[in-house]
Image: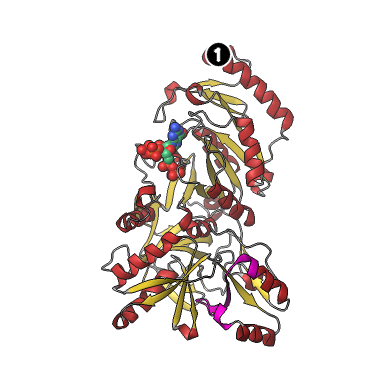
Amino acid sequence: MLVSLEQEIQRRHTFGIISHPDAGKTTLTEKLLLFGGSIRSAGAVKSNKISKSATSDFMEIEKQRGISVATSVMTFEYAGRRINILDTPGHRDFAEDTYRTLTAVDSAILVVDCVKGVEEQTERLMQVCRMRATPVMVFVNKLDREGIPPFALMDELESKLNITARPLTWPIGMGAGFRGVYNLHRRNLYLFRPGKTVVEEERVFIDRLDDPVLDERTGSDAAKLREDVELIEGVYDDFSPEDYRSAETAPVFFGSALNNFGVRELLETFIEIAPNPTPRPADTRVVHPSEKRFSGFVFKIHANLDPRHRDRIAFLRVCSGTFQKDKVYRHVRSKKDIRFSRSYNFLAERKRQITEAFPGDVVGLYDRGNLKIGDTLTDGEALTFLGIPNFAPEIFKELVSTDPMRSKQLDRGILQLTEEGVAQLFVQEKGRRKIIGAVGRLQFDVIQYRLTNEYGAACRFRPLAFSRACWITSEVREVLDRFVRFRGHQIAVDRDGNLVYLSESEWMLQSIIKDNPGIEFHFTSEFKTSGGRSGAPVPVA
Ligand code: G4P
């Protein structure tokens, strides 16, 4: 049977899974894949997190890079749907990678640890989702531990994440007495016995809250559940999937990923209400997934996985039409046509050659250095997708060559690494002075290690006093020229030739902004279309 493009779109969901490290992102992903039958046993999904003990162990970082390429995209089928999970590094020093990955999803699932509540990294990730109006579902995990009581957690989610939260499941008991979740959405529940696999026989189905089986199985928790449900139904408005899809309400699910409690409820609601691939804004127009002509953008690049080859994998999100292997596509930035004969998709931990892909899918393209993050590919049309900006970094160091004989290696290496998005490169003095801007300190360790080991460069970093950067423009050329002349030592140029102003502190930046009304300061690189002055800086760490 020939499946139409529209049908392929309707059965696809592409989401990002985000959390503060250790909240249970990897465990939840694994359980979702188990439901989909993509993996058969627990432990098959390797965590891509950089363990706490490994923060200064470069070999470990390299190993993790290998793992994270395998787990950056995981695809599984469930109930006829095709679900693409985009994993994100939990480590705050690699937050930029997470933000970029979020540009390629249509929704997100946020995992929160019920013992720790909303943690710092969670707040920042949520800010990014809000900024992009990405629909979010929250999975409150580890209910098998004594944590913050559910009503208090709901309040914390609303106040710290600045969202309207609406529970769709509700826990029965907590800690050792956790017995399952009541599905407020479907008004039924399964009672479980803890187990690490998906064991259907151990589930008891109840579709009426006054069912005596509930009292038999849960004792005093039954009365508490009835009370809670009455309260929830009185306090919260009826759940509207539309409000979720427009990112106004975040449905909340409770459970324990490790014990597989509440995961099915999450998954089944997800496939019922989560958005299919959505239209994407480009510079010239909005692109709809159902358009026949192919288009997509690169949101992530993994380079030099094999140091003997300079190959890299570019991750492309398909936005419209059908991607086909071996077809020639237009690389809009360079105005060149490129053919990709090696293209992959990712099924659990396996990478598979593909012949075609549809909107929402992520294709891994083997590339010899043509592609950069943010690049658009189309089947001819000159359009560029928006919303994949560079974020203003917060730590700046000058990259200094320690061996003039190897400065070529250094130049090539740093260019490639910054194209890969490991950090951002700004130059002064016509390229003679290189400044690396990053979000986290660990990024500098990774850069130095990779420059030395992959490119044979010899270098060190010299700390700089800057802590803020923003892109500057002006409607009046002379005003901009004067500003640049006057503040030369604080001006640099980014990879695309845009002017960047570097400041020692937020306070100084604010005073410069106030004193220079003729200059526009932008906190992401995507200012050409955002227009005007941005408000608060985008959170980057
Ligand atoms: P992350 O990807 O968000 O960083 O978290 P990950 O899934 O790796 O989980 C972090 C830790 O929390 C792991 O324990 C994991 O087993 C545990 N965990 C996940 N879900 C639950 C849950 O529902 N209940 C409880 N009690 N623990 C949970 P670990 O000891 O750090 O690692 P491991 O040795 O178990 O793999």
Taking the magenta stretch, the answer to whether it contains residue 494 is yes
User: Image quarter for residue 473?
Assistant: bottom right
Q: Position of residue 281 (x, y in %)?
A: 62, 64
Q: Secondary structure at mark 1?
A: loop
Residue 52 appears in the figure: yes
Taking the magenta stretch, the answer to whether it contains residue 65 is no
Name the residue beneath numbered marker 1.
219
Q: Residues within 10 Å of mark 1 (few under 14, many from 20)?
A: few
User: Total of numbered circles in the picture?
Assistant: 1
The correct choice, above or below, for 279 with respect to 220 in the image is below
Q: Position of residue 447 (x, y in %)?
A: 38, 66
Q: Is mark 1 within 8 Å of ligand 1?
A: no
Q: Position of residue 17 (x, y in %)?
A: 50, 47
Magenta residues span: 488-509
The correct choice, above or below, for 119 with respect to 401 in the image is above
Task: Identify the amino acid type marked 1.
Answer: Gly
User: Image quarter for residue 293?
Assistant: bottom right
Q: Nearer the viewer, residue 127 or 120?
A: 120
Q: Nearer the viewer, residue 409 or 432?
A: 432
Residue 285 appears in the figure: no
- Identify which residue is drawn at 57% across, 83% down: 488
**Ligand 1 quarter of the rendering:** top left
| Residue 362 located left or right of residue 225 | left
The correct choice, above or below, for 301 with respect to 45 in the image is below
Model colouring: secondary structure
Q: Position of residue 321 (x, y in %)?
A: 53, 61
